[in-house]
Amino acid sequence: MRILVVLICSLALALGNAVAQEPQGKKQNKKGAPSRQGAPQGTKAGGKPQGYKPAGPPPKTAGYGRAKGGAYQANRGYPNVERGQANKSGGYGKAKGKGQVQAANANKPAEMGMAKGKGKAVGQPAGHNPPTVSKPGKAGVAAGKPVKPQHFKLPKEPNMAKAPAVKFQQGRHIEGSEHWQGQQYAAFRNYHSEWHDQGWWHNHYHNNITFVFGAPYYFNAGYWFPAWGYYPNAYYAWDGPIYAYHHLPPDQVIANVQATLQQQGYYHGDVDGLAGPLTRAALADYQRDHGLYETAAIDRPTLESLGMT
C-alpha cells in the first residue's frame, strides 16, 4: 500500500513539472528559437529576412540608366555607360566615382548628360538632342545674326594717322591669295595693281567709278578696286578688292563692317570708313575664329558669316 502511494505521488509530481515547462518552451520559441528547417534567427523560411520586400524595377523616369555606385543615371538602356563608354546617341559618356556621368562631348553645356550623387539623377532624358549653339563672338554676340545695312555719317577727310596711305606697287598680287580656294576668292587671286590715266579707266569701266575721300574706285565682278593713276596723288588705305555689300560705295561698306565687328568685340576703333590697320586686324581675328581664310579684307564669305548678305 505504501509503495502504491509513493508511485502515485511520483507520477503526479512528474506530470506537474511537464505542464509547467511547456509554456516556457513556447515563449522561447517566439523569441527567435531556431525553426525545424534550420533558418537563422529573425529569418523567414526561404532565407529572406523579416520585412524584406523585393526590389522592384527601377523608376520609370525616361532617360535614366544604372551607373556605378547604385545610382540611376542618364540614358537608361545603355549598359556601357557604367563602363565609361559613350552610348549610341553620342551625348553621354564616362561614369566616374559613385553615380556620376559626365558629358562625352566638350562642346555641349556641362550640365547636359551629367548626373551626380547617390540615387539622384541630373541632366536630360535619353534621346534628348541639345540645341546647336552657334559660336559667339568675343562680346557674346552669335555670328551669322542678320545685319541690316546702314548709312553712316563719315568724316569728310581721312585720318591718315590711324589709316596711313598705302603705296602703289605695279603688278602687286595679294600675298597668300593663291591658297584661297573657291570662286568667291577669285577676285583676290586674280588681282594685281594697275596704273592707268583717267581716259583708260573711263574707256574700260565707263560709269562704274565712284570716289571716296577724293580717291576713285572702279566696280568689277561684285567688288570695288582702287583705280590707281586716275588721280596720281589719290589716297588709299588698302590696295585690294572690297566686296560691294548692298551696292554701297566702298566707305559705307567698310563702315558697316566696322560697326558689325565692333558689336561682336573684334574692332575697337572708330567707324570711319577706312580699311586701315585696325580694321584689317579685326577682320583677320574674326576670320581666324570662324574658320575662314585670313584675307584681312572685306570678302564675301566673311560678310556672309557676319550675317551681312
Image (spheres, rainbow, N blue to C red):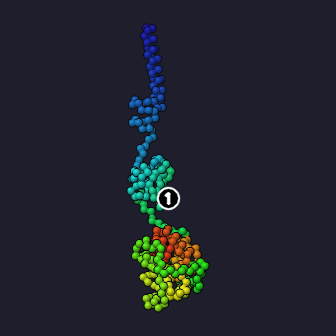
Question: Which residue is depicted at the point 42% across and 82% down?
Answer: 221
- The picture places residue 287, in percent across and down from the top left corner, at 49, 71
- The picture places residue 283, in percent across and down from the top left corner, at 51, 73
Vertical arrangement, residue 280 with respect to residue 27, above or below:
below
- The picture places residue 159, in percent across and down from the top left corner, at 60, 81
Vertical arrangement, residue 255 with respect to residue 53, above or below:
below
Q: Is residue 242 visible?
A: no
Q: Residue furthest right?
A: 161
Question: Which residue is depicted at the point 45% across and 21% down?
Answer: 18
Considering depth in this image, is 301 or 163 the residue closer to the camera?
163
Q: Is the N terminus in the top left, top right, bottom left or bottom right quadrant? A: top left
Vertical arrangement, residue 150 with respect to residue 105, above or below:
below
Considering depth in this image, is 258 or 22 the residue closer to the camera?
258
Instruction: Name the kind of residue labelled 1 in the image.
Output: Ala
- The picture places residue 153, in percent across and down from the top left corner, at 57, 84
Question: Which residue is depicted at the point 48% across and 89% down?
Answer: 197
Which residue is identified by label 1?
Answer: 110
Q: Residues within 10 Å of mark 1 (few under 14, many from 20)?
A: few
Q: Which image quarter: residue 89?
A: bottom left
Vertical arrangement, residue 266 with respect to residue 274, above or below:
above
